[in-house]
Image (spheres, helix red, strand yellow):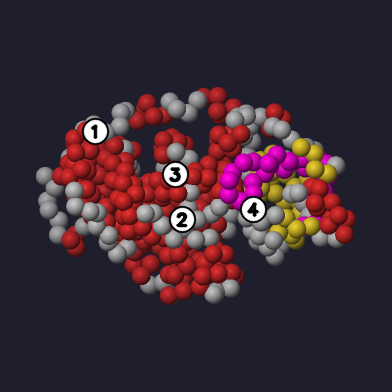
């Protein structure tokens, strides 16, 4: 039933539609579209976090399987599919390689129960992508190192030679740009 | 129990939490604040969305041959996915809502009230419980009503969540639910409210540093 969208048409809304068909009809074809698009990206994320290659592929499959198994928990007005998958992949990475940090994150089930819907979140990740592309180099670098190498602020300072204060202020500026995207600037 | 929350984590701290890059001791303090603060839950959701968009933008690393087929086999093995979401909700016992401790902390220490914890006196008017978190340094601090902590600065970055009572220092008034996000440059001397003990959860990436010779003298013993 899914009209085969061209690459250009595959936006956040397209992936949210796929998720709804997985939840409602257990539609494997829609799921495999999600798999083909997101698995190389989840895999790239995990490799960036220092996960060894074959474990990264196992965890990628686990993340996508969670998408299939928990599709009924997905709410398009709350998060883009990429956001949801990022959370799942991050938690899998923490479970395997940073087990101590697991104490600080609630399980997915608790999240759906206790977190109220927060309607002001714009679930369309596509515009956000444009904000990221427009960040100045040093800001993009610290954001990237935080998310994709799991580096703390002081590790980033050490590695890039930037003073700790500049690492933090670059992050702050980047977050301000993101926040404008989310419309929090009123 | 938690009134209006006035003080929140910095943006860098929220981002670090979403990215998974905060040490366990510090991430725990943020996670507990989130239970009480819907504004910060939203900030974390936004930071997660940034993570998702960045992930979408990464240079693709395709899986090895055969992984697609094994994924399809997994779908056939789990045709209906997880059972009714209502079942998943049951794993939160009703008793938990009566706990004085935030959920994540309760999971860690397996106690429902502060008084049952193994408090150890460190100086008159101050007790603490060391929390085993394996990365960084997390503890519960209990400052007796009306007492003042020694002046101290932080060699590293310290996060504090007030769980009961309140205190005042040079940065303002902090009440239950409030979050103090202090980096190495801040020196402070909190004074607990007069009416009840102040209980806080603190997480840091380096030990506290006390100033003045008396503090230096007691530091090896109090080991904050
Ligand atoms: Zn908050």
Q: Which residue is mark 2?
A: B19
Residue sitting at x 52%, y 67%? A156
Where, quadrant-wise, is the N terminus of chain B in this rendering? top right
Q: Which numbered disc covers residue A40?
A: none
Q: Which residue is mark 3?
A: A95
Residue ID at (43%, 25%): B90
Q: Is residue B131 magenta?
A: yes
Q: Are marks 2 and 1 in contact (CB under 8 Å)?
A: no
Mark whose residue sits in front, 2 or 3 = 3
Q: Position of residue B198 (x, y in %)?
A: 74, 41
The answer for which chain carries disc 4 is B
Pointer 4: what residue? B204
- How crowded pointer 3 is (Cα within 10 Å; few <14, some 14-19, many 20+) is rated as some
Q: On the rendered structure, is A133 left or right of B72?
A: right
Task: Give above or below for B109 relative to A89.
Answer: above
Q: Which residues are magenta?
A: B125-152
* Residue B127 in picture, x, y percent from top left: 77, 40
Tell me, yes or no, whether dots 3 and 4 are on the same chain.
no
Q: Is residue A163 left or right of residue B173?
A: left
State which quadrant residue A71 falls in. Answer: top left
């Amino acid at each position: 039933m899914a009209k085969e969208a061209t690459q250009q048409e595959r936006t956040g809304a397209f992936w949210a539609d796929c998720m709804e068909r997985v939840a409602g009809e257990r539609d494997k074809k829609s799921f495999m579209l999600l798999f083909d698009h997101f698995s190389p990206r989840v895999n790239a994320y995990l490799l960036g976090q220092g996960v060894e290659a074959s474990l990264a592929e196992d965890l990628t499959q686990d993340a996508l399987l969670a998408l299939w198994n928990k599709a009924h928990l997905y709410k398009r007005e709350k998060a883009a599919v990429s956001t949801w998958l990022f959370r799942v992949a991050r938690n899998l990475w923490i479970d395997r390689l940073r087990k101590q940090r697991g104490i600080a994150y609630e399980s997915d089930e608790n999240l759906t129960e206790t977190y109220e819907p927060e309607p002001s979140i714009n679930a369309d990740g596509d515009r956000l992508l444009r904000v990221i592309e427009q960040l100045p180099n040093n800001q993009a670098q610290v954001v990237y190192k935080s998310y994709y190498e799991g580096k703390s602020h002081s590790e980033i300072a050490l590695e890039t030679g930037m003073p700790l204060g500049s690492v933090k202020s670059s992050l702050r500026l980047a977050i301000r740009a993101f926040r404008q995207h989310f419309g929090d600037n009123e | 129990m938690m009134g209006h929350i006035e003080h929140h984590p910095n943006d860098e701290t929220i981002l670090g939490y979403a990215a998974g890059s905060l040490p366990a001791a510090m991430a725990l303090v943020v996670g507990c604040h989130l239970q009480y603060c819907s504004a910060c839950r939203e900030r974390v959701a936004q930071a997660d969305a940034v993570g998702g968009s960045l992930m979408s933008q990464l240079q693709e690393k395709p899986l090895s041959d055969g992984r697609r087929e094994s994924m399809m086999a997994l779908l056939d093995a789990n045709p209906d996915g997880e059972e009714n979401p209502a079942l998943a909700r049951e794993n939160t016992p009703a008793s938990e809502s009566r706990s004085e401790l935030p959920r994540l902390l309760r999971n860690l220490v397996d106690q429902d009230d502060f008084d049952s914890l193994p408090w150890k006196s460190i100086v008159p008017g101050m007790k603490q419980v060391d929390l085993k978190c394996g990365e960084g340094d997390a503890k519960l601090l209990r400052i007796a009503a009306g007492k003042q902590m020694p002046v101290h600065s932080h060699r590293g970055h310290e996060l504090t969540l007030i769980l009961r009572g309140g205190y005042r220092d040079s940065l303002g008034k902090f009440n239950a639910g409030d979050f103090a996000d202090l980096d190495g440059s801040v020196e402070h001397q909190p004074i607990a409210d007069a009416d009840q003990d102040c209980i806080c959860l603190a997480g840091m990436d380096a030990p506290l540093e006390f100033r003045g010779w008396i503090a230096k003298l007691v530091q090896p013993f109090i080991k904050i």
